[in-house]
Image (cartoon, helix red, strand yellow):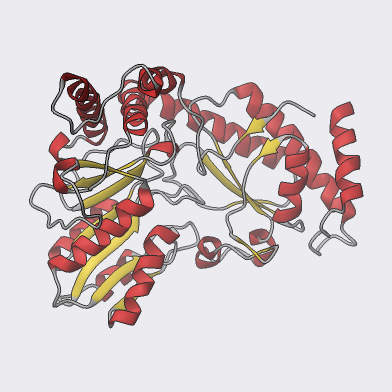
Amino acid sequence: MPTALYFDNNATTQLAPEARAAIEPFMGTLVGNPSSTHSAGGQIQHAVEKAREHVAAMLNGAPTEISFNSGGTEGLNTAIACALEALPQRKHVIVSRVEHSAISAPVRALLKRGYRVSEIGVDKDGRIDLAELNHEIGPETALVATLWANNETGVIAPISEIGDAAKRAGAMFVVDAVQCPGKLKLDMKAMAAIDYLAISGHKFHALPGIGALFVRKGAPYKPMILGGPQERGKRAGTENVPGIVSMGAAAELVNKGLELDIKREAHLRDTLQLGLSAKLEGVIVNGAEPRVPNTLNVGFDYVEAEAVLLMLDAAGVAASAGSACESGSLEPSHVLKAMGVPLSAIRGSIRFSLSRYSTEPEVLELIERTAKVVKRLRELSPFKGSPSKAPTQADLDEHKRYFANA
């Protein structure tokens, strides 16, 4: 097998060596419940609070505004519920048409409870239509919820302008910032309109299963999980100490190296974009600036994303399509559909996402392997202008031999 190339960091990232080292003592040497009053428990509680300080510094918020949970989905569900409970007489919610399901699913469930939901469109570059937002928002609006950086295209939303619109209407503002740490400077003091903001550790080199919710001081809050007094009463249950410590270590890395990481990843992303465009015809970049530095979503005309991913996997490349797999076939991405991307490009769209550990030699090798895959699939196509057929097992076996000997 060829050397593995991992370019699916928007799905999950590798554990940072510093995070691995930080959690090692908590995997056996240090034992204690952070809620216990003895010194062993106090030592664990100290580590939890130190991690909270690092996460708060990454967001430029106060440690008291940070509560740990299981990840972005829990954080967003909690924030949406708290925001709606704060304004029970209002029955209107605004989201965009390009949300992650962690926002869109709980919001659409509100339709059964009598809420009206407005989904704001985006332009061809993935930018939210602020004129439509300002037209839709009003005195009945309880909540505006949106993502800061799109998980499929990397396009950055105008959070300041959206937040201003929410505050003018007296609505609560919930932000999905899961794709932001390590890619954008997050400043909760400057972004005063944000009431709740969710992040997830495994997106920036901490363990999976740990997240944090920023709840601005004074914002209404009612815990979803009831029980003990953990997390200052905001989230019951014994803390996931290894996860929390790993998240603190990962946040500390962000605090120390954000500017350099942004420059490096943007350079590598642009190298990838230019390299693919130079080696292949019919390459469409989905999404325009401003984008997070690590994400490139590209459409390859006349090939199927499913086929591309299968052959990339056989070539040792981990990437993803900007769409969900249902019943064995890829459904067109709701994000790219909302942007008006041509169907021929949507069906062949692939998301490559880098991390602070991606290297230039890896990117150059990715360009070569991807170009070979796309050219080979176009050769398999009955005629140019028609989507390529899905590769058979024989095709994949031959493809592996091809890359092994390349």
**Which residue is found at the position 34% from the left and 24% from the top?**
249
From the image, which quarter does the N terminus lie in? top right
> Where residue 317 sits in the image (x, y, percent)?
69, 36
Q: Is residue 3 visible?
A: yes
Split into 4 quadrants, where in the image is the C terminus?
top right
Identify the residue at image location x=46%, y=37%.
293
Give the camera-side residue of 171 and 83.
83
Query: With 337 as the anchor, is 1 left or right in this view?
Result: right
Identity of the residue drawn at 61% across and 65% down: 332
- Name the residue at the left extreme: 218
Position of 161 with respect to 155 (left or right) is left
Q: In the displayed structure, does residue 219 sit left or right of residue 394? A: left
Is residue 180 shown above or below 142? Answer: above
Camera sees residue 99: no
Residue at point 16% right, 19% down?
A: 39
**Residue 195 versus residue 66 in the image, above or below:** below
Task: Point out residue 282 in the picture as x, y percentages from the top left corner.
Answer: 72, 52
- The part of the image, by quadrant, that contains residue 383 is bottom right
